[in-house]
Amino acid sequence: MSVGFIGAGQLAHALVKGFTAAGVIAANRITASSPDTDLPTVSSLRKMGISFTTSNKEAAHKSDVLFLAVKPHIIPFVLDEIGPDIEDRHLIVSCAAGVTISSIEKKLLQYRAAPKVMRCMTNTPVVVREGATVYATGTHAEVEDGKLLEQLMASVGFCTEVEEDLIDAVTGLSGSGPAYAFTALDALADGGVKMGLPRRLAVRLGAQALLGAAKMLLDSEQHPGQLKDNVCSPGGATIHALHFLESGGFRSLLINAVEASCIRTRELQFLADQETISPTAIKKTTLDKVLQQPGVSSTSVATKSRVNLFNNRSGGKK
Amino acid sequence: RIQCRCLSVKMSVGFIGAGQLAHALVKGFAAAGVIATHRITASSPDTDLPTVIGLRKMGAYFTTSNKETVNKSDVLFLAVKPHIIPFVLDEIGPDIEDRHLIVSCAAGVTISSIEKKLLHYRPAPKVIRCMTNTPVVVREGATVYATGTHAEVEDGKLLEQLMASVGYCTEVEEDLIDAVTGLSGSGPAYAFLAVDALADGGVKMGLPRRLAVRLGAQALLGAAKMLLESEQHPGQLKDNVASPGGATIHALHVMESGGFRSLLINAVEASCIRTRELQHLADQEKISPAAIKKTTLDKVLQQPGVTAAGVGVRTGLNLFNSSTSKHKKN
């Protein structure tokens, strides 16, 4: 089985690194594509031994499971580009925040009768095989397709199926979650440095404390509040610290963060559902690169995405 | 004579105290296989602690006599609350031998205060101070230690071998330990609070509670692991997750607006400052009668080998009120 990635950025890189470390698929059975070869992740992907190409169509041809690892607003554009190349064997897995299965199926139904689509939301710690992934299965994908995806994603972390309408909330929580953690770790280290610790040690201890606590929680049946109580000895240092956190509304800030990320995800979904890509959202040089790929015609891409491609070199009839 | 202090199969470990910390360390050591549980003893006058059952189930030997623990151990962890330390030291002082390595885990209690007490009983007590945290229970602890006047480098290495089996462990200057307490000692509590809140956020947006807790904890774990395995700055890793105009950067803004970072700096600071306060109280060397239950005192005095005079004089406690009223007050 071969795996392809449309997109060669952070997400593709993290997944490839995780999959190869897990040994769940050989690097030479992975292809990644992007018209932009300047991405810092491209050289790293090449070093891992996968096949990199500037042609999305080539990635589609070489793959059985095809991850769409591009930004949400690019999805309709990419779907029109590779639509004609999708075969019965293909399992399309979209990782794009806010992009619904129905919007993807709607596009692909113009090319195929029963496109197999899945939607997943994962996160960057797949790179160290501690990701958090959820997925939902589309109309024409079978239970076995879900199990196949689950096998892949479980090799790089936690993976479970969910109802599609929960995925935006998951985006807010575990999709964005690592960024909340990195911010917290930077601040904890600042606290340690303020109280006299060297920076490297402070970063190390902060990260280790978070990791250990998270692992305790995952391995325990107990409520996080109970685990917190167990660490707070009477009159001790920890309960003094917790009072500061509560006074400042620490919990509320995190609820706000999950909510803000989820809401923004739903906004992105709304924009994506409009099905057309604004010309302002694509660089002319990128468009050119795409059009130069073998098999891509400006009419097929332009008509459906309604981008005006006929201004300079591609002066064919509109 | 050079003693090899590598962790040998014949080495025994004891815990004065049978509460959360002792339980977590025993569980971690047992899971790591670094020492057999039948070579572990834990003691406490209080048999009602919920952790006592856990310790027994793991195969550790539990006793109500701290002196028995000392007699059975080579490495002796002091896993009691800071204000109890002087009391315990006076109780077990006479039983300390040359072989003993005393490892205090008590927040804010200095090596010099422990050595000062033990010097009443021995010319060269080997003392190490450490600060660890509860994730040792899942072998992902964070431990630092400082070596006392009479402990050798090999003693430090021995402790490091034990503690490294249950997580990260490194030697530090003693004067950093209070700051470490504020950061990684208390750190797990900050994390539990955060996961509870993140889960609330997930539930607010429609997720079932169990899934929300799972995803929140997994996201924190994964991020922490990424940072530990990366040479990159946490800010760089944060940048990598925040795609332009995306969901994450929107969330980060609300966090920054609320002073999220500052709250965590405050927390580390508050915990460190309180630790230093506790140190000051402990350095006063006497334990207030208000800090010990009479029933606990009685239990201690009933242990073989413990005399009211031995315990009372140095701690300044008036032990002669109830059942010990036959003895003369000094």
Image (cartoon, coloured by chain):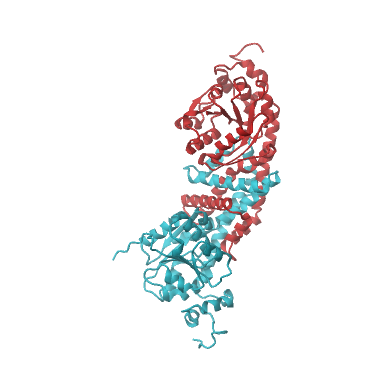
Chain colours: A red, B cyan
Which residue is situated farthest in the top direction here? A317
At 58% from the left and 77% from the top, the residue drawn is B295
Is B157 displayed left or right of B17 in the figure? left
- Residue B117, above or below B240: below
Q: From the viewer's side, name the closer residue of B236 and A258.
A: A258
B207 shown above or below B85: above
Is residue B33 in view from this perspective? yes
Above or below A307: residue B297: below
User: Percent x, y for residue B293?
Assistant: 59, 75
Position of residue A202 measured from the top left corner of the image (x, y, whole percent)? 49, 52
Which residue is located at x 55 percent, y 18 percent? Answer: A293
Quadrant containing the C terminus of chain A is top right
x and y percent of residue A256 in the render? Answer: 67, 46
How many marks can you see? Answer: 0
Nearer to us in this view, B266 or B35: B35
Q: What residue appears at the point 51 percent right and 41 percent down from the top-left corner?
A: A128
- Location of residue A271 by image quarter: top right
Residue under the image location 38 percent in, 72 percent down: B97
